[in-house]
Image (cartoon, helix red, strand yellow):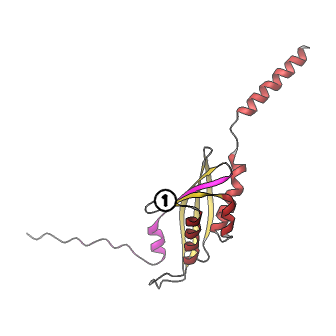
Amino acid sequence: MKNLYATLIILLLALIYTSCGKPDFSDQIEPLLDQYVGVWNGDSLSDLDEIVTKDFQLRMIPTFEPMIGLEKLKEAITATRSRFPDFMINETEKLFVGDSAIVIRWIATGTFKGEGDLTITKKKVQVPGFSVIFFSEDKITGEWIAYSDLTWSEQLGFSLIPPTVESKQK
């Protein structure tokens, strides 16, 4: 009888111990993230319909003003693909932040096709950046994207010229 009680106590403690552990969200979110990055990398925009919320919020430099909605996300991806037809995101590091966000460091690459009056074409870029991707249960709810505009611009052939300072004459 003592052995039965000891076994039950051990089983109860093991059950309590394992149920108190934090869930591993990476197993749940990893497939969504792979599919999401795949869309940025050229997969079908319709894949987003199943993996992001209708009120998805995209925030990007320089203003981080929210672009709200699934259609705004699709427009942003389409615009990026239009400017850089071979655009690719290559993930370099992932860090889960609690149970609702992940930070992904990445390198974006692509060849600039040109836009409007810009005649700079076929220039290749390779720019590091990061995204904070938010999720709730089995959907991605938003993304904040940050990278250096100066790095993009320099690789496209632009240069930053400081303003001239007029000397004070006495």
Instruction: Write down the quadrant of residue 71 in the picture.
Output: bottom right
Determine if the magenta segment contains residue 22. Answer: no
**In the rendering, at what x and y percent does residue 50 appear?**
69, 60
Q: Is residue 60 left or right of residue 44?
A: left
Q: Relative to the observer, which residue lies in front, 74 or 80?
A: 74
Q: Amino acid at mark 1?
A: Pro
Outermost residue toward the right? 1
Q: Nearer the viewer, residue 136 or 158?
A: 136
Q: Is residue 148 above or below residue 31?
A: below
* 64 versus 168 height, above or below: above
Horizontal side, residue 39 vs residue 115: left or right: right
Q: Point out the image quarter for the N terminus.
A: top right
Q: Quadrant of residue 39?
A: bottom right
Say whether residue 131 is visible: no
Q: Does residue 161 sit above or below 3 in this rendering?
A: below
Q: Which residues are magenta?
A: 138-164
At horizontal 71% and vertical 50% (from top left) the residue drawn is 28
Residue position marked by numbered label 1 in the rendering: 66
| Residue 44 position within the rendered picture, expressed as x and y whole percent measured from the top left | 68, 70
Residues packed near mark 1 inside 10 Å, few (<14), some (14 to 19) or many (20 plus):
some
Q: Residue at x 55, y 66 (%)?
A: 72
Q: x, y (%) of residue 11? A: 83, 26
| Mark 1 element type | loop
Residue 116 image position (x, y, % from top left): 46, 83
Please give the name of the residue rendered at 67% of the width and 58% of the height, measured from the top-left corner: 51
| Residue at far top of view | 2
Location of the C terminus (image quadrant): bottom left
